[in-house]
Amino acid sequence: MSARGVFWIARANLRADRKGALLNATAACVGAAALVFILALGMGVSQAARRMFPADARLVEVIPAGVALGGVLGGGRLDDAAVARLGRLPGVEQAWPRLSLRVPVAASRPPTGLDYNWPPGMTLQIPVVGVAPGLVQADVRAGRAFADPGPGGGPIPVLLSRRLLEVYDKTIAPAWNVRRLPPGLSIVGLQLPVRVGFSIVPQKTEDRVYEARLELAGLSDRVPLYMLAMPLDTVRRLHREYGKPDAGYTQVTLLARRPDDVPAIMAAVRRMGFSVDEGERSAAERVGTVVAVTTGALALLAGVMCALAALAIAQSLSASVRGRTREIAVLEAVGAAPADVRAVVLAEAALVGLVGGAVGTALAVVAARIADAAAARALPDFPFRPDTFFALPPWLVVLGVAVPAAAAVLGALAPAAFAARIDPARTLS
Amino acid sequence: MIRLAGVTKAFRDGDRPVPVLRGIDLEVRPGELVAIVGPSGSGKSTLLYVAGALDRDFAGEVEVAGTRLAGLSPRARAELRNRAVGFVFQSFNLLAGMSALENVMLPGMLRRDGAEGTAAVRARAAEALAAVGLADKARATPAHLSGGERQRVAIARALLARPQVLLADEPTGNLDAVSGEGIIQLFQRMAAGGMTVLVVTHEERVSEAASRVLHLEEGRLR
């Protein structure tokens, strides 16, 4: 029998048993709705968590050990030799040093060209870290340089954490009653007038204070949350200008070739006598684990619901087939082979699963929209609050339809096999 | 054409075989309306199902519409039933959830090649219904048809594929005299048109209309 014939007969059979078909489709619908809603929520929350903790799975942050026995083990200071050794570790693709600026930098005026209500009398102390350009090169806006302009040169290029913008807009700006910043990359190019050497902390202002400008060259997740990043050479130059000799780098960032290389690299770093700063990474991992475990558990529950739907369909179809043995025998009398009979029963299950899955998926999408709308009304505007708590990629929609259909077909295998074994001659006699 | 040679068949009663057909030799030629009569339990229906390639558990030679049944796969037997054999049953055996038209469409929708579209099958089914005088009952379900109408729907279904062989099992058993007479006349017209018609019955009005009457007793034809 052609597929057209199989589905024509299956549809007619389902029409004849509307109540049973509706019950089975409802079971599939509930399973699909739960599956899609839970997976969409899990992925949506996971995406939001990744925005909040954008840990790069290939980065390892090396810091000097708290108790330095490194002189003996080859560790200790993070100087150029140590950076070179770290860069040669198996699995390491790049090693980039970072150096915190020990010369205070403060701003007392708003960025130039920005309509901003800077609070009168406010001075902002700006923590700065110098980074190797290679670390942030991908985040520097095209056409802009991230290199030391030299003494008396132009503005100093800086990079800002993307997350700081979000935190500023959602918490700092409302608390200070100041304007929010324009979104994302539109603020790249802004210049902030600063005083180099000036500190708001008594006794910490340097003997020499001069005016300079910081120019935003881009936004990067590789910049610490509450710091500005400027070229490493600029930090070195400022240290030289202010007579602050460098005793090694503050931190070295290693880029692993593959995420799988990270554990071995971390172990090797520790063997060298250095420590690994796992703050961001472990926070991201903890959040990721919690989200994954919760989503997994709920998805398992949804899977169980799909399995129960399959069982319900199996039981219902089994009863239906047993009640239709004469009709099945008639089908065989007018030309259906046992394989055709099996195909018709499986097609009935597939149709029920597909319709139930499609409706369930649609319901899940609607429920997700309603939940988002409710969250938008009920939740405060906190940092990193996502526009949606649900991720609905096309494959999830396909999965929402396919899983109940597949479960229904699996559940129908036994009833279909029973139907195919019906002896038409004996049944019709 | 139907040809049976030395056909035997037995049911099992526990370990004991109970013979139903004992060496049946039968030939029904195109254009013939042959009636097989006999008491209940004599094996009439079994003989019909063997001749219609519906029962494969027998010994002997059977040839239907030029095809020998021995060694045919279940699919090939199904295709033979679909293409060359029409069945009419005493209890009509219409599918209750389908309309009269859909019941008649069934053999067309079961065609393996799928060459004929659904619309074409529907059109032919409507013609077949019209041919048995039920054009106005196409949308009615079996529950809304009289016994005679149901049997005519069953005949339209059997004739949809324009089979060479028509097998009828007590076709008038559940019908009143008028309806039964109409069905008998229909069978006569089919046989006159060149179809091979084999009817098992215990009703005289059917056997009287047949061109040949055979008696089945204790598994043997006389």
Image (cartoon, coloured by chain):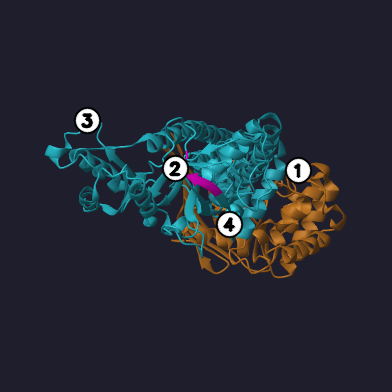
Chain colours: A cyan, B orange
Q: Position of residue B112 (x, y in %)?
A: 58, 63
Which residue is located at x 60 percent, y 52 percent? Answer: A187
Q: Which residue is mark 1?
A: B174
Q: Is residue B138 left or right of residue A229?
A: right
Q: Where does the image place residue A316, in percent across and percent down from the top left?
A: 60, 34
Q: Reading the chain from its start, which is encountered first: label 4 or label 1?
A: 4
Q: Of tags 4 and 3, which is closer to the observer?
A: 3
**Residue carrying label 3:** A67
On the image, the x and y values in percent for residue A423 come to 53, 45
Principal secondary structure, stretch drawn in magenta: strand
Pick the residue in front: B176 or A341. Answer: A341
Tell me the SS state at disc 4: loop
Mark toward the start of the polypeptide (2 vs 3): 3
Quadrant position of the C terminus of chain A in the picture = top right
Q: Relative to B221, say whether B96 is above or below.
A: above
**Residue closest to the far front:** A207
Location of mark 4 (residue): B52
Q: Nearer the viewer, mark 1 or mark 3?
A: 3
CA gap between label 1 and label 3 equals 102 Å
What is the spatial separation of the Cα atoms under label 4 and label 1, in whole angstroms? 22 Å
As rendered, which of B141 and A251 lies closer to the eye? Answer: A251
Q: Which residues are magenta?
A: A193-198
